[in-house]
Image (cartoon, rainbow, N blue to C red):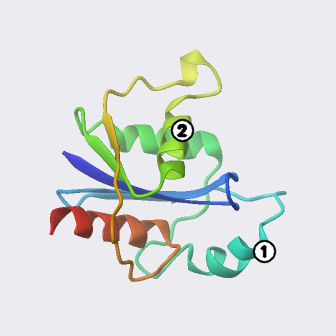
Amino acid sequence: MKIAIDCEFNGFGGQLISMALVAENGDEWYQVLTMNGIAIDPWVKEHVVPVLWDEDSFQMPMERKDFRESLHSWLKQYENPTIIADWHSDLVHFFRELAGENHMQSLSYPCKAELLDLDASSNIPHNALEDARGIMRAITK
């Protein structure tokens, strides 16, 4: 099973803001983290924050613990998938979410990761869900 991933984060190398996973069977997972008390990068404030949600993807922002639990629950339905990204930082954030605060909180999740140079068009650039959908379209065409 192939799963496309895209993340939005607070500037280059910055804190994770949102993550989306789109499986080749059409199943999707999208969540946004709370941004309480963090200074938002000006570019992110202008280009990412206004498109964090569309009418189909609104989710209340989650605390990291709930975000990770939701991600782990969704991933468990897929056995040994290939996680496909078009930017290395997306994979970094994905694996950070698998690694918890300590060993007990970490998820041992067998998977492969591929970083591809893709021409993935998005209907809403800088929205992680739309970008992940674009990646899936690019790898399945």
What secondary structure is marked by label 2? helix
> Residue, x 35% and y 77% (percent of image)?
121
Q: Amino acid at mark 1?
A: Pro
Task: Give the side of residue 45 with respect to residue 76, left or right.
Answer: right
How far is the residue under mark 1 from the one under mark 2?
25 Å
> Residue, x 78% and y 74% (percent of image)?
42
Tell me the residue that label 2 is attached to.
97
Query: Residue 51: x, y in percent?
Result: 56, 79
Tell me the residue that label 1 is attached to.
42
Query: Residue 128: x, y in percent?
Result: 48, 66
Query: Residue 120: x, y in percent?
Result: 34, 71
> Residue, x 55% and y 45% (percent of image)?
93
**Quadrant of the rendering where the C terminus is positioned:** bottom left
What secondary structure is marked by label 1? helix
**Nearer-N-terminus badge (1/2):** 1
Query: Which quadrant of the figure has residue 82?
Result: top left
Q: Nearer the viewer, residue 62 or 97?
A: 97
For mark 2, does the 10 Å Cα neighbourhood hold few (<14), some (14 to 19), or many (20 or more) residues? many
